[in-house]
Image: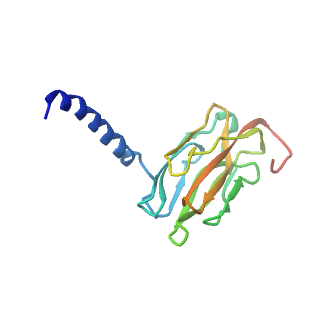
């Protein structure tokens, strides 16, 4: 075999192999087909979500999350709770009740539908209210791809998500609901 060819091809193969196995060292909170319960430390909120799909592992995803301390202007959370739960195989939209912000996620896998149930852990900060809310684009952009969402700018927080499930592809796409929060107390219970 031509040594010049090997000098050219071997680095490409090494790069491809590294990219393929890159998902193994991400600090995943679950293994395939297993449930998980992730909560940010007290006073922190979810700011980034990443997932990796595997059709061979039950059309399931590995998940990892990142938290960040809430701004000092919000103070300490006044209370936290587990909010609405989804049903596996169904579309789901959930926004934290009582003006809460997402500080955790739990999920359970169901082999019968090759999908998961979802639930957000929400925390309320005094009587602060959300405003300037928006939805992200689809995460992942296409089914079965790696998905990643990082809050795009300081001052936005995750309030919930809208998710669709493809019964054919056995995967979900997410649109995360992001909002700003007032620096003052307001009278509204849920916006």
Looking at this view, is 170 or 150 the one in front?
Answer: 170
* Image height of 146 relative to 12, above or below: below
Q: Which residue is drawn at 66% across and 58% down?
A: 81
Residue 146 x/y as whole percent: 49, 46
Residue 41 x/y as whole percent: 54, 48
Outermost residue toward the front in this view? 1
Outermost residue toward the right in this view? 187
Q: How is the rendered protein coloured?
A: rainbow
In the shown orientation, is residue 129 left or right of residue 156?
right
Residue 155 x/y as whole percent: 67, 33
Q: Which residue is drawn at 14% across and 31% down?
A: 2
Looking at this view, is 41 or 104 the one in front?
Answer: 104
Q: Residue at x 80, y 50 (%)?
A: 190
Residue 187 x/y as whole percent: 86, 45
Image quarter hosting the N terminus: top left
Q: Residue at x 44, y 51 (%)?
A: 28
In the shown orientation, is residue 138 left or right of residue 64?
right
Outermost residue toward the bottom in this view? 112
The image quarter containing residue 9 is top left
**Total number of numbered discs in the rendering:** 0
* Image height of 3 relative to 171, above or below: above
In the shown orientation, is residue 147 left or right of residue 23?
right
The image quarter containing residue 129 is top right
């Amino acid at each position: 075999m031509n040594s010049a060819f090997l000098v050219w091809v071997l680095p490409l193969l090494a790069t491809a192999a590294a990219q393929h196995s890159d998902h193994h060292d991400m600090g995943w909170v679950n293994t395939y087909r297993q449930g998980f319960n992730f909560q940010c430390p007290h006073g922190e909120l979810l700011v980034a979500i990443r997932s990796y799909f595997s059709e061979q592992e039950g059309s399931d995803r590995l998940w990892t999350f990142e938290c960040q301390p809430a701004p000092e202007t919000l103070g300490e959370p006044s209370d936290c709770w587990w909010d609405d739960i989804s049903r596996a195989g169904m579309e789901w939209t959930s926004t934290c009740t009582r003006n809460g912000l997402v500080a955790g996620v739990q999920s359970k896998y169901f082999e019968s539908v090759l999908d998961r149930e979802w639930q957000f852990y929400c925390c309320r900060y005094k009587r602060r209210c959300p405003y300037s809310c928006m939805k992200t684009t689809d995460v992942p952009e296409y089914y079965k791809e790696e998905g990643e969402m990082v809050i795009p700018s300081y001052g936005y927080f995750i309030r919930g998500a809208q998710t669709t499930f493809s019964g054919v592809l056995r995967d979900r796409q997410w649109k995360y609901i992001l909002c700003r929060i007032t620096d003052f107390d307001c009278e509204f219970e849920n916006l």
